[in-house]
Amino acid sequence: MEAVGCLEVRNLNCRFDSKWILRSVSFEIKPGEALAIIGPSASGKTTLAYCLSGIIPNRIPGEVSGSVRVDGEEFLGKPIRERTKTISIVLQNYELQIFGLTVEEDLELSIKDNDESTLEWILRFFELEKYRDYYVHELSGGLKHRLVIASAILSDPKYIVMDDPVANLDWKSKKTTARTIELLKERGKGVVILGRRLKGLEKVIDRWIYLAQDCLENVNQKLNHPTVENRKTMLNTTEDFIIEFRNVYYKYSREYVLKNISLRIRKGEVYAVMGPNGSGKTTLMKHVNGLLKPFRGSVIVKDMDTKKYSPAEMSRYVGMVFQDPEKYFVSETVWDEVAFGVRNLIGSEENVEEALRMVNLLDKKKSSPYSLSMGEKLRLYIACVLAMSPEIVILDEPTTGQDEETLKQIKDAIEKLKDMGRTVIVVTHDSDFVFSVADRLTILKDGTIYAEGNPLQLLSNPSLIEEAEIEPLSILSGEKCLSR
Amino acid sequence: MFIKIKLELDPRTKITLFITWFSLPFFCKDIYSLLTVLISTVLVLILLRSATLVFRKMKIIVPLILLAWPLWTFLSQWSLFHTSTRGVDPIFGLFMMLRLLSIITISTAFILLVRPTEIIRSVISLKLPSSLGVIVALAFRNLYIIAEDYKSIKEAHISRGLELDKGSLIRRIKNYIPLLIPLIIKSIDNAEKLVLALELRPNIMTRRKIKPLRFYDILIMVGCILVVISVIYYSFYMVR
C-alpha cells in the first residue's frame, strides 16, 4: 500500500560502474520526525543523501533504481532544482552553501519576494536575530549549520537531509545543532540525519537505523565505551620536560587568542588539549613547531627558544599532522609522499620504508595517496611525519569525522609512538578518545588554561565539563550513546 | 581631530567609485598626479578605518611591487609595447612602480570593502542578468577561500621541512611548486562544490529590490566624473 504523508524510500539501489554502494535500502519518515541513519566510513551514507537530493545521478553519474516518494509522488527522476523545493540537503561541507558575508546578507539571497517580514520571521524562528549583522566567519560551526538550514527553509521544503552534521563541531555547536533539529520538528519538517557518530543529538532523534554492507538494519549495536578498568594506565612520572610554555601571549589582530599560557609537557607522554572552537588549541600547537612565535613570553622546545628557529628547522624535532591530510598531498605515490619531507630535511629516503611499515601501509607504497580511505590517509600523513624522526608528534583534531575503526587505528598509532618514546600531543573534541589514550589533559577556554591534570579526574567532573563547554564522557553522561 | 565617518554607500556608487579610482593611475602621466592619487587613496582608507586591513593583505605583494622599479628602469628600452629612447631611466622606473602600487592598493581595497551581494545588486540595477552578478560575486568570494587554502597548505609544507625562502631566486621559485599542486586540486574541487551548492539553492537572488540613489550617492558619482575629467585635462593638456 502506498504511504501518503511521508517520505518513503523503497528498494533504493545505487552503483558506480560495477560496484554496488546501496542495495535495497528501504525506510520511511513522517513530517515532524527525526530519523538517524548511522554507519561506518564507506557504508554509503553520503551516497544515500545524494540519491535523495538528486545529486546522484544528476551531477554525479551513477545507476540509481528503486523509488523515492513524497506524499505518493515519485521524485527519483526529477532534476535537483525541483527536488530541493521538497527535499533539501545540507552537505557535510556545509560552509560551501553559505554565499553571503553576513547572516542577514546570506538569508536575503534566498528570499523570493520583497516582503521584509520574511527575513524577520526566519531570523526569529531560527533564533538568529542577535547574529543578523555577524560576519559568517564569526559564527560557530553550529550556527553556520543553522544558517544553511534557515536559507534552505525559505524555499519551504518538507524534508531536510543532513549529511554528517556534527562531524566537525565542538560540543557547544553540537548542542546548537540539536536545538535546530528540534525547531525543524516543531515546524513539522521531517529530518534525515546521516553520520558516523551522532553524539550530542540523541535527545532529538526519534528513530535510529544502521546502514551497513548495502542494507539497513535496526540498531542493535553493543555499546563500546572505554571503561575505567580497561583504561591503559602508563603514566609517565619523570620530570624531564620537553616542551615549556612560559607566560605566552599571542594575538592575530586586536584581541589576544592566547593569554598568559604556562604549561610543561613531559618527554614520552601523551598529552591532550581540549576546548571549544576558538579557544586557541591550534594556535597553541602552532607555537610548538614555530609556525607562530609568541607575542609575549617564550616557548622552549628541547631547550631551544622557538623564536630563534624557523618552522622548517623545528620540523626536525616536531612533526605536525594537520586536519584534512588529503589537502596537503603533493606526490603521485604513497612512497613519494612520505619521502617528500625526508628529502627536504636530509636529502635521502632512509626512514620511508620503516615509517610505512609502522602504519601498515607498506603494501600500498605504489598507490596514489588520493585513492586511500580516510583512515589510511591519516595514517599516511602520520608516516610522513614519522619518516622525519621527530621526537614530538602533534595530531591536530585527528578524530574529527572518523568512524570507530579509524579511531582504533589512530589510537594504535599513538600507542606505538608512545612505546617508541615519542611525545605525542593530541588536539581533539572527543572526550572518550582522550580518556582512552592521554596521560594528561589541558582544557583551554577563551585563550587561557581552564584546567589541567589527569584526564579521568577532569572529565568526570560534571560542573567543569559544563563550564568548559566540552563533550562529556559517554560512560558518565547518563545519555544513551549509540554512536560509540 | 579624527572624525568617524559612517556613510552607507549605495552599491552602484561603490562600483562607480572603484572604476573611477582604478582608471586614474592609467590617465596619470607624471609622478605628481600619481602621488596625488595614491595619497588620496590612503587618506580615504584611513578615514574608512580600513588602511591597516588593506595594507596587511598587501604585504605579500610588496616584493613584486619593488621589483617593478629595476625592471622598468633598466629594461624599458627593450619594451615590446613602446619604442623608447630613454635608456636607463630611474624616474620612469619609479613612475611605473607607483602606478603598480596604486592599482594594487585600489583593487585590494575593492575586494576587501565591497560585499559580494553589493556587486550582485549593482549588476541587477544595471538591468543585467542576476546570474552574471552571482558569477562575479562568487568569483570574489572564492578569492578568500583560495587565500585561506594557500595559507594552510604553506604552513603544512613548512612543517614538513620545506624552506621556501632559502637559496637563489630560481631555487625559491622551485620551492613554491609543491604548494601549487594541492592548491590547484583544492581550488578545482572547491569550484565544483560551489557550483553544486549553488544548484542546491533554488531561489538565489531572484528578488529585485532596487533602492533609489540618495543625494550623497549622486554627489559622489558626479564628483567621480569631475575627478576623471580633471585628471584627463591635467595629464593631456597641462603635462607635456
Image: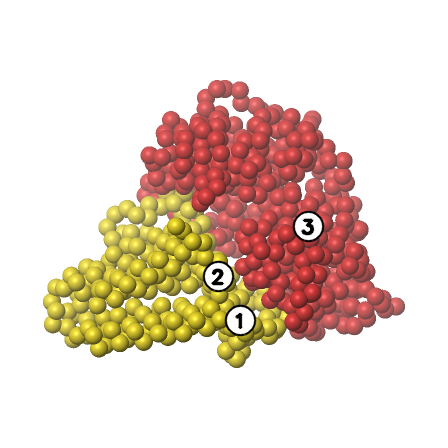
Chain colours: A red, B yellow
Residue depicted at x 50% and y 19%: A238
The CA span between labels 2 and 3 is: 37 Å
Q: Say the numbered circle drawn on residue A177.
A: 3
Residue A426 sits in quarter: top right
Residue depicted at x 75% and y 45%: A202
Give the residue furthest to the right.
Answer: A1
On the same chain, marks 2 and 3? The answer is no
Q: Amino acid at mark 3?
A: Thr
Q: Is residue A272 left or right of residue B222?
A: right
Residue A183 sits in quarter: bottom right
Q: Amino acid at mark 1?
A: Arg
Q: Say the numbered circle drawn on residue B121.
A: 1
Q: Is residue A20 left or right of residue A329?
A: right
Residue located beneath label 2 in the image: B7
Front residue of A274/B130: it is B130
Q: Determine whether the residue tagged by mark 3 lies in a helix, strand or loop.
A: helix
